[in-house]
Structures are given as C-alpha cells and as structure tokens.
Image: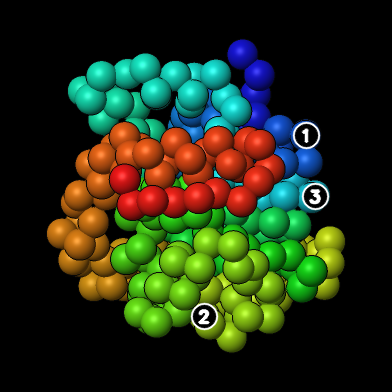
Amino acid sequence: MTDFVSIERGLGPEGRVAVVRFDRRDGINALSPEAMRQLTEAARSFEDDGDTSVVVLTGGAKAFSAGFDLKDAEGRGRAEMDLGALRRHLKLGPRLTRAWQEMEQVTIAAIEGFCVGGGIALAVALDFRVMARDAHIRVPEIGLGMNMSWQSVPRMLHLMGPARTKQAVILADDRIGADEASAWGLVEHLAEPGQALAGAMALAEKVAAQPPMSVAMTKLTVNRLAHALDDLASHMDLDQFALAGMSQDHKEGVAAFLQRRTPRFRGR
C-alpha cells in the first residue's frame, strides 16, 4: 500500500505544532478512498496527543486536492454496488471531514494550486485556511450531477452566508480566486505563491504560543455553538448523494468530464 500521508510533530514553540502532508506526488492529489482513509487516520492519531496544539494540513506544491478520484478503481466500483454497500462506502467522506473538524487541536489548511470538490469539503472542516494568491477553488459536484455532501454546505454557510454558498456550489464551472475567496470569508489569510505553508506555520506558531488548554476549550465552545444544527441540516447528505448517483444526469456529468466535453443535462 502506498503512503499518501506523512506526519511531522514537534515543530514550533515548545514543539506544539505538527504538519500533516497529503501528497500523492502526481500534481493532482485526488482523494481516492484509500487516501481518505489515511487522512482520517492521520486526524485520529492526534486524539490522545497532549503535546500538539496546532495541526497544519498541506497538500502538494501544485494542488491541495483535486477532490474525489473519479478514475480510482475502488471509487468507480460504486457503480456496481447495491444501495446498502453504496451507503456504507459513501461514509468515507463524511467520516474524513468529521475527524478533522472534531480534533481538539486547532487546524489550519495551507492551500497551493487548486482546491476542488472534496478538497474544499476537507478544507472547510478545518479551523483556518491560508491560500496562495495564485491558487483557486472550484466546487464541481453539481456540474457532475451530484450534490455537495460531506456536511460541507453548513460549514460553507457559516463562513460565507447563503448567497455566496449558493454561488460557489451551484455555479460549478466558476473558479473562485484567492482574492474572491478571501473577500467572501472562505479563507482567512492569503500568502504569496509558494508560501501558503509558511503562512500557515506563522499562524500556527502564534496559536501554539497561547495556553494549550484554554485554546482547546475555546475551540470546542465555538464549534459546538456554530455547528449545533449542522447534523440536522445535512443528515440526508449521504442519501441525496446516493440518489443523485443513480440519475442519468450524474452518468452524463461524469462521462462528459472524462471525455472532456460539455455535458447535456435533462433532469433525469
């Protein structure tokens, strides 16, 4: 099995910063099912880590993540699964984002290149986002005949408000540049090209210099208040995704993507 994720601990003030690197070394950094499992386990590895106050998640030099890997053999096998097996497999994404959101440590995403689909879903599950000025974000799910799931819509709504969330999610072909993402509230800090990780580390060091227990308790309180209704709002995410995946529009969207052509949707 190939390791897509590595962890470096003991960085920053008093060694309280860790860096998780997700890099498939292919310039795309797609989220295959195996990559999602590894990223979930990376988050869970900090559950009993009292020495780490801040975790920085970074992707490759050219991409944070291209989102779900539509070409991965295991992922494409979903088309042959019965509904029960499909629902179980679709839990990989929500499980990943939940693991990162529920970490006691403060989490920071360092975004270079592009951050697409599932990459956005992962990034908005973290506490802060630092984005290179030449990077961009895109949410292509609707353009592929799917819904934006993994509890991403409530998280994006908290950051941007309803109109911007609709704009980002519904207008699937629109790229959101770094300046727009910052103005909308989708990212908190901008960095020069190639310096997103450095910017994230600078922020991490400021957080790590604060009293660890007070920081952890404050994060917990804010998250509980902000996300109190998220489960209620998105409890049908998974089933909506499964249902959309059975539509002709989804098949057309994926086929058009793989064939590099414009899709023709018919509401079927």
Circles 3 and 2, Cβ within 8 Å, touching? The answer is no
Q: Which of marks 3 and 1 is nearer the N terminus?
A: 1
- Badge 3: few (under 14), some or many (20 or more) residues near its Cα, within 10 Å? many
Q: Which of marks 2 and 1 is nearer the N terminus?
A: 1
Q: Position of residue 183 (x, y in %)?
A: 59, 86
**Kind of element beneath mark 2:** loop
Numbered mark located on residue 61 in the image: 3
The quadrant where residue 258 appears: top right
Circles 2 and 1, Cβ within 8 Å, touching? The answer is no
Evaluate whether residue 22 shows in this view: no
Which amino acid does the dot numbered 3 rest on? Ala
The quadrant where residue 3 appears: top right
Which amino acid does the dot numbered 2 rest on? Gly
Q: Whole-Å distance between the Cαs marked 3 and 1? A: 9 Å
Q: Where is residue 57 in the image (x, y as percent from the top left)?
A: 61, 51
Q: Quadrant of the C terminus?
A: top left
Q: Residue drawn 77% across and 34% down?
A: 26
- Badge 2: few (under 14), some or many (20 or more) residues near its Cα, within 10 Å? some
Q: Whole-Å distance between the Cαs marked 3 and 2? A: 23 Å
Residue 31 versus residue 102 in the image, above or below: above
Q: Position of residue 196 (x, y in %)?
A: 74, 64
Evaluate whether residue 144 shows in this view: yes
Numbered mark located on residue 25 in the image: 1
Which residue has dot 2 on it? 185
Q: Which of marks 3 and 2 is nearer the N terminus?
A: 3
- Badge 1: few (under 14), some or many (20 or more) residues near its Cα, within 10 Å? few
Whether residue 9 sits left or right of residue 165 in the image: it is right
